[in-house]
Image (cartoon, rainbow, N blue to C red):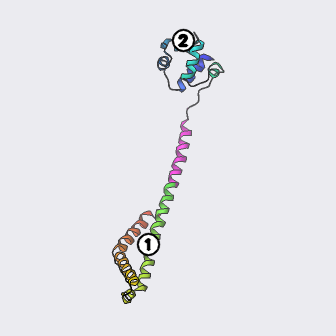
Amino acid sequence: MLKDNIKTIRKSKGLSQEELAIKLNVVRQTISKWEQGLSVPDSELLVSLSEVLDTPVSTLLGENITEQKENSLKEISEKLEIINLQLAQKKETKRKIWHWLFISICIILILIFISLATLGNSYMEWDYNDPELAVLGVGVHSFIWLFVRIAPIIFIGSIVGICLTRKKQ
């Protein structure tokens, strides 16, 4: 029992006999003898062994520990398939979000254009002697000036975005 447990736990921790021997300040042959059942560690070494292997002494002295099976190829492929499906769903969600964002931008630009077209140049007829109307008129004029120059570029970019993010069948 002890010999099998030492070997199993050592291997599960990824330690060689040499590495374990160095950590315990013994020679490799001592570890080999323990694992072959030719000798047993004294109580002091048993405590040190449990600390190095991060395993309780009772576990070392207890029943045989079975090695955990490594994931089979089938289990790994199933896990990868689940991960791939999750990534595909995440990618599809991002695509939909971008698609609807581009559509929303186009709609907002069209609505602003329609509202500016109905407003026309009526702000030019305001009484600019009133300081508040003058500031508002300059603000409206600046907005229209920027909108006329930037909106077409944003609109075209959004149309391209809609085309690039549409669902391909």
Q: In which quadrant of the rendered view does residue 155 lie?
A: bottom left
Q: Residue 101 magenta-drawn? A: no
Q: In which quadrant of the rendered view does residue 76 lie?
A: top right
| Residue 65, horizontal then vertical, whole percent | 62, 24
For this orientation, the residue located farthest to the top is 38
Residue located 43% across and 86% down the image? 118
What label sits on residue 33 in the rendered view? 2
Q: Residue 83 magenta-drawn? A: yes
Q: Which sits earlier in the primary sequence, circle 2 or circle 1?
A: 2
What label sits on residue 106 in the rendered view? 1
Identified by mark 2, the residue type is Lys
Label 2: state its secondary structure. helix
Q: Quadrant of the N terminus?
A: top right
Q: In this view, does 88 lie above or below 130?
A: above
| Residue 56, horizontal then vertical, whole percent | 61, 23
Residue located 47% across and 20% down the image? 19
Task: Sort mark 2 into few (<14), some (14-19) or many (20+) by Cα contacts within 10 Å.
Answer: some
Res 169 visible: no
Q: Distance between the residues labelled 2 and 1?
A: 78 Å
Depth check: give the residue in front, 134 or 34.
134
For this orientation, the residue located farthest to the right is 63
Q: Is residue 38 above or below residue 9?
A: above
Residue located 48% across and 12% down the image? 27
Identified by mark 1, the residue type is Cys
What label sits on residue 161 in the rendered view? none
Depth check: give the residue in front, 123 or 88.
123
Label 1: state its secondary structure. helix
Predominant secondary structure in magenta?
helix
Q: Give the range drawn in magenta.
A: 70-89
| Residue 15, horizontal then vertical, whole percent | 50, 23
Depth check: give the residue in front, 125 or 10.
125
